[in-house]
Amino acid sequence: MLDFQDTASKFDRLRRQAEDLIQLRPNTVPEKLCDIVELIHELRTHQAELEIQNKELKQIRLLNRQLLMAQEQERQTISCKLLDNIAQNLATLKINCETILNSPSGLETDQQEELLHMSQVLQETLRAVRSMGQDLRPTNLDHFGLVRAVDAQCRHHAQQCGLTIEFSAVGLEELPLERSLSINIYRIVQEALNNIKQHAKADHVFIHLVPAFPNLILRIKDNGQGFDPCHVEHQEEKMGLNSMKARAELL
Ligand SMILES: Nc1ncnc2c1ncn2[C@@H]1O[C@H](COP(=O)(O)OP(=O)(O)OP(=O)(O)O)[C@@H](O)[C@H]1O
Ligand SMILES: [Mg+2]
């Protein structure tokens, strides 16, 4: 870790000493010493600029953290609304359809078929809404911890996209992980899987998660067409890789 304060005071001391020397023996001071003083002055200016940049970087990291936290909060609210209101209402409608279908109501055959179709559409919509709710707020994380939640996420994704996903996590089951850390890793995997689905043209994915105290190593590899991260680095409108990077920096 750079200690800007310490470096700055060393520069100042050095410059003061050199200036004292010049004052003491003005006629004998070699020209070079003046150059050194000049150089120290430049270094000091440069160091002050770095200090400002470092402060700005810290500020950006803090903002990133707050932004990601606000985003999680927002996702949680939307998820609750989806699951508590919309999913509940859809389930009620589906039960109503089935009640009418099962009662001796004297409905025409085509009306019964229509109702059956409605009930199936409601069932599919209900499944999609629940899946969206789970994506927005992965309750698996709270109930089963990071490893099992990521495992479930991989199995769900593999099934949906027709991919083979090999997930392995060693030595993490026993580790107490903060929720903020777990959610960031979960989201990084989620975004990577979405990217693989959208861009990779892959059929095999490898995900490895291992602790390397005090860090965690997460490796995600697919056998698709690949891409050059430097090429997409400056595309500001792309959110996925940027948010993965921001989350990784917070860990
Ligand atoms: N696994 C991958 N295989 C191939 N290309 C990828 C992969 N992951 C990312 N890319 C490339 O990197 C680009 C940037 O990805 P990024 O997730 O940042 O944006 P995006 O997926 O295009 O849009 P979004 O903002 O919706 O995530 C993608 O457009 C794609 O070209
Ligand atoms: Mg993406």
Image (cartoon, rainbow, N blue to C red):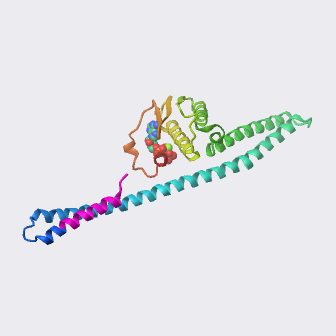
For this view, does 87 lie left or right of residue 53? right
Residue positioned most to the front: 24
Horizontal and vertical percent position of residue 18? 18, 65
Name which quarter of the figure residue 16 lies in. bottom left
**What's the magenta bit mostly, secondary-structure-wise?**
helix
Give whichever of 56, 13 is nearer the camera.
13
Q: Is residue 17 magenta?
A: yes
Relative height, residue 176 to residue 73 (above, below): above
Q: Residue at x 81, y 38 (%)?
A: 115
Horizontal and vertical percent position of residue 97? 82, 40
Number of callouts: 0
Q: Residue at x 7, y 68 (%)?
A: 28
Residue positioned most to the left: 28
Name which quarter of the figure residue 42 lies in. bottom left
Horizontal and vertical percent position of residue 169? 53, 31
Magenta-highlighted residues: 1-18
Q: Is residue 251 magenta?
A: no
Give whichever of 19, 232 is nearer the camera.
19
Give whichever of 62, 113 is nearer the camera.
62
Relative height, residue 154 to residue 133 (above, below): above
For this view, does 49 lie left or right of residue 196? left
Name which quarter of the figure residue 140 lies in. top right
Horizontal and vertical percent position of residue 61? 46, 55
